[in-house]
Image (cartoon, coloured by chain):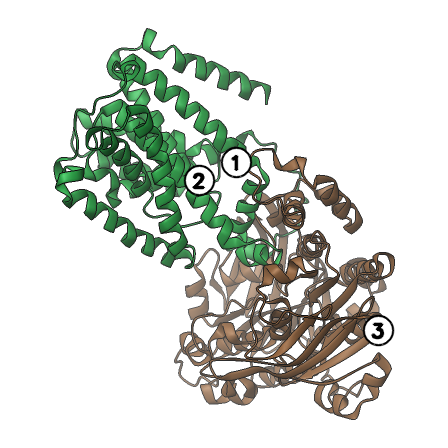
C-alpha cells in the first residue's frame, strides 16, 4: 500500500522544554494507526505538528510524498488532512447542521461566496454526513446543547466534511460512556472499512487501541519508541517498562473492610433540586459523607454527577433542599466561602489557570491552616512531574498533567473534604493505578473524599460506600459489597 | 414567519409614507435613526457575526463622510461621484487598517485599531486646509433632488433598505456562515481549511464599506461633517447600540441605534445628562437581557427545544 503520511524526526520545544524530541512514524493508505503513550508523552503536540497547528523546530512531515512541514493548517487540510481535538472543539452558537455545513463549504471552497444563500451549496453533502454519523435527528439543535459524547461525534462529522484522505483523531473517546465509546469505535472502523479512510488516532484505553488499530506507535517523553503491529508492540520490552508499567493485570492492594458509618456526617445534602436555567437536572438528591471515608458517586455521562459536586461546591446553588457541612448550613453560600470551610473541589475539566505557571497555580490554591498537612513539598512528592515543570505555564502542560495540577491545587488548600470529579478520566493506565494509590494515601491521612467516577472498577477499589445516580436521581445507596451484589442496579444504571 | 414578513412590509410602508404624516422634525429624526442604524449594523457584521473586537468603527463612517464632503467642496468633483467615492474610500481604509489588525487577536486587535483610528482622527482635526480642522465642513452643496428634507429622506430610506438587503444576503451566504464559524472557534475553522485572516479582512472591508455608506447618508442629511464623527467616543456608542439591541441578531443593532438616537434627542431636550438614562438602561440590560433586546425577543419567539430534563449540559455551558 502506498504511504500516505511520513513523519521524520520532529522536534518542538515550549519555553525551552522539549515536548517532542524525535518523533517518527508512517501511515500507509487504508490503515488505522494508533499512537499510545503516558500523559505528557507529547501525543497532542505531535498531532499539532502533523496537522500544522504548530510548526516544528526541526524534522519533516510528508503528506502523500509532498513535504508539508512548513504549510499552515488550512493548506494541509485542503491537501486531505482532517482532524479532531482532545477537548470538544466545535462551533457552539451554530446548529449541528451548520457546523458540518460550514466545513463542507470550506471544502467546496465557497466560503467567499457572498450573494446566494448558503444552503444552495454543499448542503446535500452535509446532510449525508449527518446521516452517516447518526446526528441527523439532531440537525437543528444548537451544538452547545449536545451531550459531551455527541459533541465528540459532531467533531468527527465536521472533520469528515473536509473529505480528508487522512483523519487525525486526538483521543476520540475521552470522557465517553462505555456505550458511546463502543459506538464511536464502530464509526471509526466503518469509516475505515467502507470508505477506505486512513485514520491516525491517539488513545489511552488499551482495549480500544489493540482492538482497532492495524499499527501502533509508542511515545514516551517526547520520543517515539517503536512502531509495529499490536502484537509486536505488546511484547516489546521497552514498551512494557515505559508505558504499561510492570504491574499490568497485577494484583491491587487489598481494600480494607468498610467500617460502618456512625455519628454525624461531615457532609449532608438533603432533597436537593438543581436547575441549569430552565432545565431541571437534579431531583431530590440526598447523600451523606462521613469523616474519613471515600464515598463513590457513580453514574453514566450526564447522569448528574458533576452537577451534584457543583451544587455542594457552591457553583450551582440548589433551587430546593439544603447542603450542610459539619452541621453548618452551606446551602446557597458562594464557592469561596465553601472552600474556606474546608471543601476542596477538583472539576472534571481541570480549570487550571493557563497563563500562570504551575507554581503560581499552586500558590493561588494555598491556604494556611494550622496543622495543614499539604505543603508544596508534599504535593511535589505526590506528583513529581509538577516539580519538574513548576515554572511552565499551565497551558503548556498535557491534559493528564493539568489533571494532576488541578488535584494538587485543591490539596494545598488543605481541605477536610475533597470533591473529586472524574480524576481518572483521560489518564494512562499506569497513572490511574498511581492515582489510586495516591487517593489511598490521602484517605490514610484522614482526608474525606467524595469521588465521582465513570471508572467503576477504580472507584469501587477505593471507596467504602456511596451512591449511584441516574437521570438526576439517586438510584442506589450502600456499601461496595452491596453494589457488587446488586445485579439490577449495576445493569440498569452502570451498564455492567 | 408570515407575520414577520407582514410586519416588515407594514414597517417599510409606514416609513415610506413618513413625510406625509409626521412633522418634519420627526422625519429628520427617523432618517437619523436609519443612518445610525446602518452604521451599527455594519459594525455588527464584524462584531456579532465575525467576533472581532472592532473598537473604532466610527473611523470608516467619518472617512466616508469626509471623502464626500472634501470631494464636493475642495476638489469640485461632481456631487454624485463624491457620494459614491465615500463608501469606496471607507472600504479602502478598511483594507489598510484591517490588514494590520487581523494579524492580532482579540483585545490586541481592538487596541491597534483604536490607535490607527485615532491617527486618522488627528488628521481630520488638524489638517485645516482640507478638512476644515475642528470646524469641520458645513453647507455642503448637494444635487438638486437631495436639497429638501423630503428628497434627502427618500434617498436615505432607499439606500438604507438596499444596504440592509445586501447585508442580509451576506450573513446568509456561505461567507456569512463561515464568518460565524470563525467567530465561534477560529482554530477549528482554520484546521477545517478556512483562511481565517482572509475572511476577517474581507468582513472588515465590507463593514467599512457600509459604514462609509452611512457616512455619506449623514452628509446628505446634515450637509456637514465634523471631526467628532471619527472620535472614539462615537465608536463606543455604536458598540453600545449593538449590545443594547442584541449583537447575535440581525436587526438588533438597528433597534439599539434607534433607541440611543431617540433617547439623545428626546431626553436630551430636558436634561443634558441624558447619558445617565442610557447608563441606567445599560445596567438593566446587562442584568436582565444579556443577549440584548432582539436577542430576548428571538428567544421568546423561538419554540423551546424539548429537553431531556435530567441530562446536564457539559460543565462548560454553565459558565458561558
Dot label at residue A189: none
Which residue is depicted at the point 57% across and 60% down?
A269
Label 3 to label 1: alpha-carbon separation: 46 Å
Marked residue chain, label 3: A
Which residue is depicted at the point 56% across and 35% down?
B172
Label 3 to label 2: alpha-carbon separation: 50 Å
Q: Quadrant of the N terminus of chain A?
A: bottom right
Q: Position of residue A2 (x, y in %)?
A: 82, 70
Q: Residue furthest toward the top?
A: B20
Residues at badges 3 and 1 in contact (C-beta under 8 Å)? no
B135 displayed left or right of A258:
left
Chain green in the figure, letter: B
Label 2 to label 1: alpha-carbon separation: 9 Å
Which residue is depicted at the point 32% across and 17% down?
B153
Q: Residues within 10 Å of mark 3 (few under 14, many from 20)?
A: some
Inspect this view and state whether residue A107 appears.
Answer: yes
Inspect this view and state whether residue A261 appears.
Answer: no
Q: Quadrant of the C terminus of chain A?
A: bottom right
In depth, the one of B58 and B319 nearer the eye is B58
Q: Position of residue A225 (x, y in %)?
A: 71, 87
Q: Residues within 10 Å of mark 2 (few under 14, many from 20)?
A: many
Q: Which residue is mark 3?
A: A214
Chain brown in the figure, letter: A
State the SS at label 3: loop
Q: Position of residue A169 (x, y in %)?
A: 70, 65
What is the quadrant of residue B85 in the picture? top left
Residues at badges 2 and 1 in contact (C-beta under 8 Å)? yes
Above or below, A355 relative to A287: below
Dot label at residue B170: 1
Amino acid at each position: 500500500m502506498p504511504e500516505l503520511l511520513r513523519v521524520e524526526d520532529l522536534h518542538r520545544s515550549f519555553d525551552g522544554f522539549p515536548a517532542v524530541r524525535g518523533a517518527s512514524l508512517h501511515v500507509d493508505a487504508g490503515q488505522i494507526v494508533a499512537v499510545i503513550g503516558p500523559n505528557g508523552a507529547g501525543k497532542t503536540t505531535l498531532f499539532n505538528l502533523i496537522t500544522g497547528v504548530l510548526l516544528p523546530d526541526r524534522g519533516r512531515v510528508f503528506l502523500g510524498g509532498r513535504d508539508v512541514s512548513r504549510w499552515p493548517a488550512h493548506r494541509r487540510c485542503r491537501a486531505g488532512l482532517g482532524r479532531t481535538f482532545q477537548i470538544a472543539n466545535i462551533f457552539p452558537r451554530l446548529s449541528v447542521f451548520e457546523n458540518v455545513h460550514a466545513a463542507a463549504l470550506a471544502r467546496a471552497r465557497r466560503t467567499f461566496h457572498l450573494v446566494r444563500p448558503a444552503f444552495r451549496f454543499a448542503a446535500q453533502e452535509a446532510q449525508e454526513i449527518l446521516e452517516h454519523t447518526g446526528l441527523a435527528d439532531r440537525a437543528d439543535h444548537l451544538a452547545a446543547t449536545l451531550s459531551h459524547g455527541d459533541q465528540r461525534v459532531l467533531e468527527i462529522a465536521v472533520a469528515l466534511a473536509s473529505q480528508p484522505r487522512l483523519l487525525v483523531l486526538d483521543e476520540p473517546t475521552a470522557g465517553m460512556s462505555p456505550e458511546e465509546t463502543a459506538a464511536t469505535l464502530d464509526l471509526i472502523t466503518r469509516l475505515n472499512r467502507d470508505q477506505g479512510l486512513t485514520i491516525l488516532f491517539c488513545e489511552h484505553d488499551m482495549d480500544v487501541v489493540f482492538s482497532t488499530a492495524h499499527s501502533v506507535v509508542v511515545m514516551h517523553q517526547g520520543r517515539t519508541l517503536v512502531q509495529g503491529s499490536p502484537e509486536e508492540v505488546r511484547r516489546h520490552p521497552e514498551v512494557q517498562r515505559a508505558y504499561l508499567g510492570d504491574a499490568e493485570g497485577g494484583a491491587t492492594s487489598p481494600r480494607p473492610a468498610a467500617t460502618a458509618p456512625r455519628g454525624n456526617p461531615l457532609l449532608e445534602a438533603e432533597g436537593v433540586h438543581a436547575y441549569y436555567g430552565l432545565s431541571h437536572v437534579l431531583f431530590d438528591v440526598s447523600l451523606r459523607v462521613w469523616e474519613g471515608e471515600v464515598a463513590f458517586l457513580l453514574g453514566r455521562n450526564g447522569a448528574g454527577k458533576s452537577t451534584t459536586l457543583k451544587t455542594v461546591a457552591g457553583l450551582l446553588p440548589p433551587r430546593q433542599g439544603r447542603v450542610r457541612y459539619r452541621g453548618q448550613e452551606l446551602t446557597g453560600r458562594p464557592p469561596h466561602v465553601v472552600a474556606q470551610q474546608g471543601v476542596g473541589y477538583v472539576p472534571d475539566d481541570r480549570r487550571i489557570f493557563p497563563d500562570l505557571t504551575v507554581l503560581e497555580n499552586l500558590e493561588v490554591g494555598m491556604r494556611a491552616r494550622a496543622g495543614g498537612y499539604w505543603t508544596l513539598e508534599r504535593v511535589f512528592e505526590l506528583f513529581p512531574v509538577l516539580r519538574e515543570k513548576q515554572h511552565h505555564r499551565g497551558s503548556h502542560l498535557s491534559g493528564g498533567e493539568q489533571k494532576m495540577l488541578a488535584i494538587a491545587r485543591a490539596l494545598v488548600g488543605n481541605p477536610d473534604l475533597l470533591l473529586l470529579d472524574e480524576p481518572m478520566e483521560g489518564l494512562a493506565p499506569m497513572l490511574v493505578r498511581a492515582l489510586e494509590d495516591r487517593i489511598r494515601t490521602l484517605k490514610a491521612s484522614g482526608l474525606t473524599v467524595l469521588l465521582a467516577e465513570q471508572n467503576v472498577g477504580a472507584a469501587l477499589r477505593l471507596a467504602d460506600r456511596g451512591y449511584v445516580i441516574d437521570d438526576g436521581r439517586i438510584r442506589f445507596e450502600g456499601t461496595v459489597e452491596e453494589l457488587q451484589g446488586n445485579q439490577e442496579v449495576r445493569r440498569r444504571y452502570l451498564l455492567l | 414567519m408570515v407575520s414577520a414578513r407582514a410586519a416588515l412590509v407594514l414597517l417599510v410602508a409606514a416609513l415610506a409614507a413618513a413625510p406625509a404624516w409626521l412633522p418634519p422634525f420627526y422625519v429628520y429624526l427617523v432618517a437619523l435613526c436609519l443612518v445610525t442604524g446602518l452604521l451599527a449594523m455594519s459594525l455588527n457584521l464584524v462584531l456579532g457575526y465575525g467576533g472581532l473586537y472592532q473598537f473604532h468603527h466610527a473611523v470608516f463612517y467619518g472617512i466616508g463622510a469626509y471623502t464626500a464632503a472634501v470631494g464636493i467642496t475642495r476638489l469640485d468633483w461632481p456631487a454624485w461621484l463624491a457620494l459614491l467615492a465615500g463608501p469606496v474610500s471607507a472600504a479602502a481604509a478598511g483594507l489598510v487598517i484591517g490588514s494590520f489588525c487581523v494579524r492580532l487577536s482579540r483585545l490586541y486587535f481592538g487596541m491597534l485599531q483604536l490607535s490607527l483610528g485615532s491617527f486618522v482622527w488627528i488628521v481630520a482635526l488638524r489638517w485645516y486646509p482640507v478638512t476644515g480642522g475642528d470646524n469641520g465642513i458645513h453647507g455642503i452643496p448637494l444635487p438638486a433632488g437631495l436639497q429638501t428634507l423630503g428628497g434627502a429622506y427618500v434617498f436615505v430610506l432607499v439606500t438604507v433598505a438596499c444596504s440592509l438587503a445586501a447585508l442580509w444576503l451576506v450573513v446568509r451566504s456561505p461567507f456569512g456562515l463561515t464568518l460565524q464559524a470563525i467567530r465561534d472557534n477560529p482554530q477549528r475553522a482554520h484546521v477545517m481549511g478556512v483562511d481565517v485572516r482572509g475572511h476577517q479582512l474581507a468582513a472588515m472591508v465590507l463593514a467599512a464599506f457600509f459604514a462609509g455608506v452611512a457616512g455619506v447618508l449623514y452628509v446628505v442629511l446634515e450637509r456637514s461633517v465634523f471631526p467628532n464623527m471619527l472620535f472614539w467616543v462615537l465608536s463606543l456608542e455604536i458598540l453600545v447600540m449593538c449590545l443594547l439591541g442584541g449583537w447575535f441578531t440581525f436587526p438588533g443593532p438597528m433597534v439599539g441605534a434607534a433607541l440611543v438616537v431617540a433617547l439623545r434627542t428626546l431626553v436630551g431636550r430636558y436634561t443634558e445628562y441624558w447619558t445617565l438614562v442610557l447608563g441606567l438602561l445599560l445596567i438593566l440590560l446587562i442584568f436582565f437581557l444579556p443577549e440584548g433586546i432582539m436577542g430576548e425577543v428571538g428567544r421568546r419567539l423561538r419554540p423551546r427545544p424539548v429537553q431531556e430534563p435530567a441530562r446536564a449540559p457539559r460543565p462548560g455551558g454553565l459558565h458561558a
